[in-house]
Amino acid sequence: MRVLVTRPPREAQRWVEALQASGCDALALPLLEITPTRDRAALQQACRALDSYQALMFVSGNAVDHFFREKAVLAQNGQPLSAIKNRAWATGPGTRDALLAAGVAPGQIEAPAEDAGQFDSEALWQRVGGTVQAGDLVLIVRGADSRGQASGRDWLAGQLQAAGARVDQVLAYERHAPQWTVAQRALAQAAAGDGSVWLFSSSEAVANLRHAMPGQSWQRARAVATHPRIAGAAREAGFGVVCESRPALADVVASIESFA
C-alpha cells in the first residue's frame, strides 16, 4: 500500500523517510512549493522591530525558516540584530523543532502539548490565551498563496484582539502550486484508483490537486487528513474514503494501517 506525501518538497522528504522507517511504502508527491516572500522590506522591518513585541507567533516551520533567514541576511549586511528574547509561539512539534534549530531557547517556546488532540491555532490558544494582557503587541509570521493573499490564523488574531492585544502580521514566504513532471502526473493519475493512500496536511494541497487534475474522479481514492478541515476538503473533492488523524507520526501510521 503506497502512501503519497503531499507536503512541500523538503517537509515531504522528511515525512517520507519517517514513514519508510515505520514500514510504509512512502513517496513524495508535493502539492505545494515554498518560495521567499516578494515583500522582503516588510519582513526586514519586522525583524528590526523584534524588541517591540511581547510574542512572535509562527504559523509553520517554513515561517520560522524564512524569518530567521532574513534576520541572518540583515546581520550579513552589517545590521546585526539581538537574539530573540520574546515568547515564541508554535502551533505544533514541527514548528517548535524549527524554532529550536534556529537557536530559540526551549524556555521561550510555547506550543500545544504533545498529547493535544490537534496541533493548530485553537490548541495553541488554550496554552497561551491566559498569558495575554491588554496592550500586548503580537507578531504573526505567516505565508501567502501565489496571489499574495494570506490565509489561516485569522481566528487566532481575533482571539488576541478580543483579549485587548494588538496584532501585526508579516508574510515570510509564499505557497505555490507545483509544476509536475510527466512522471508525477502519471503517478497521481494511477493513485486515483490503485489503492494508494494520499496524506494531506493542507486544504490548499487538496485544492491544488483538484486544479491540476480537473474532472478526475476520486471516488476510488483514499486519504488520511491531519485536521478535520482538511478532511472536509478531501471529502468535498470526492475522495471515497477519508480518515482523520492527529498529525503526529505514530497516529498517521496507525491511520494508514487501518486501511489494510
Image: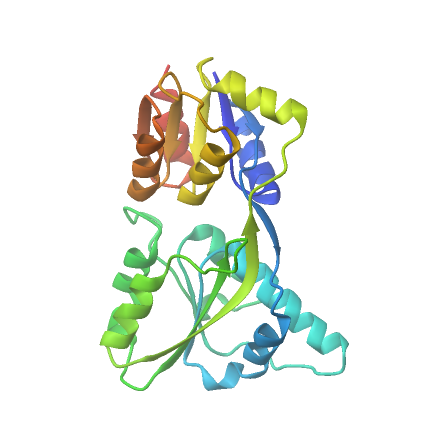
Left-right relation of 109 to 34: left
Q: Quadrant of the C terminus?
A: top left
Left-right relation of 18 to 234: right
202 or 245, nearer to the observer: 202
Left-right relation of 167 to 122: right
234 or 98, nearer to the observer: 234
Q: Is residue 102 visible?
A: no
Residue at horizontal 57 percent and vertical 59 percent from the top: 173
* Relative image position of residue 32 (x, y in whole percent): 54, 43
Residue at horizontal 49 percent and vertical 24 percent from the top: 3
165 or 150, nearer to the observer: 150
Q: Is residue 144 above or below residue 240?
A: below
Q: Residue furthest front?
A: 215
Q: Is residue 225 above or below residue 39?
A: above
252 or 206, nearer to the observer: 206
* Relative image position of residue 78 (x, y in whole percent): 76, 82
Residue at horizontal 51 percent and vertical 27 percent from the top: 4
Q: Is residue 11 visible?
A: yes
Residue at horizontal 60 percent and vertical 63 percent from the top: 37
Please, which colouring scheme is shown?
A: rainbow
State how many labels appear.
0
Q: Quadrant of residue 157?
A: bottom left
* Relative image position of residue 36 (x, y in whole percent): 63, 59
Left-right relation of 149 to 238: right
* Relative image position of residue 41 (x, y in whole percent): 62, 76
